Image (cartoon, rainbow, N blue to C red):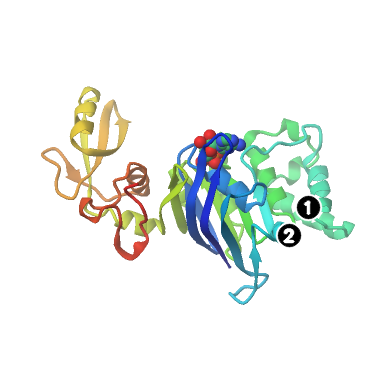
Amino acid sequence: MELHITGLSKTYPNGTRALDDVSLTIPTGMFGLLGPNGAGKSTLMRTLATLQEADHGSVQLSGVGSSGASGSTINVLRDKDALRRVLGYLPQDFGVYPKVSAEDMLDHLAQLKGLTNRAERRAEVAALLQQTNLYEVRKKALGGYSGGMRQRFGIAQALLGAPQLIIVDEPTAGLDPEERTRFHNLLAEIGEEVIVLLSTHIVSDVSDLCSNLAIMNRGRVLVSGTPQELTSALTGRVWATTAARTAVAALQERHAVISTRLQAGRTVVHVVADAPPGPGFEAIAPSLEDAYFAAIGGHLGHAADAGTIAEGRFVDAAR
Ligand code: ADP
């Protein structure tokens, strides 16, 4: 299966250009869409989930209904009903009816999804409650669920009807570390035969889970590829130094600083540079977080490349 997005643009009536000519190819597996708040991730997710219209562009989902490329192709923006039949969606602002139990709610949603056979529906609901580790609390009202339980319920409802395209929008925001790990494990088990599109502003969500990713900012895709491809583009170009907090501003003036982080009361500063930036800096192996901040800051490309890196994978890094 492959989700093929071409030239997608969206400007809201207030003039905000939320998607600016987004093109992206998303293969089967877990795909991370990484970007800061306001990057356009939710707008892209809602458009793919057929909940809002784009101004321009097209989206095809190919290879549907079979394990190979031979399946059918859905024109996502035009054939909304066909897309909805294979879609599972966990929106960012997922609300629940507080007085209804997880079991009753899932059963109701399963009916809406067209699971009309009662015995089959009950079996699927029970299996999903087991999978998301909610079976013990299935009779409890959703209003009494913790944030982590609620998100796991959100995944359970997204998985109803065996979807092939699963979209989860910022699912770990607000979860504590333990709940996040639990949620990651659940996502990782969903399966390799479907597309799971995960939007997040948390780099470790992506580095833990995703075999491919794209980094977005201001409505544009800055770069896409595997985590290895993104980090190897920075190999030999990330340098670290430790400075007093008061010295950080001066470093920022002189260097392409991509991150500053407090560590034991001192500030660790990461810089992108093609040559050693000076005494006190040591070369470090780039992490995905370095690639993320370098992309957001417009420092992914070599100065001489004017923003494009080999093979055309790194698009518009300088814009
Ligand atoms: P993200 O999910 O990455 O935080 P969004 O897609 O929510 O980004 O938002 C992208 C931009 O579009 C932001 O500037 C946001 O304020 C704006 N935006 C989102 N929804 C609307 C809307 N319904 N009307 C106007 N502007 C919007």
Instruction: Please tell me whether mark 1 sits on a helix, a strand or a loop.
Output: helix
Choose between 192 and 8: the one closer to the eye: 8
Location of mark 2 (residue): 85
Q: In which quarter of the image is residue 271?
A: top left
Amino acid type, mark 2: Arg
The nearer-to-camera label among 2 and 1 is: 2
Tell which quarter ligand 1 is in: top right
- Distance of mark 2 from mark 1, alpha carbons? 18 Å
The reply, left or right, for residue 220 in relation to residue 70 is left
- From this view, report whether residue 226 is shown above or below residue 177: below
Instruction: Please tell me whether mark 2 sits on a helix, a strand or a loop.
Output: helix
Rendering coords of residue 89 (x, y %): 66, 50
Which comes before the other along the chain, label 2 or label 1? 2
Q: In percent of the image, x 81 and y 32: which residue is there?
A: 99
Q: In which quarter of the image is residue 282?
A: top left
Rendering coords of residue 36 (x, y %): 45, 39
- Residue lying furthest top: 246
Rendering coords of residue 241 (x, y %): 20, 37
Location of mark 1 (residue): 125
Q: In percent of the image, x 83 and y 43: which residue is there?
A: 104
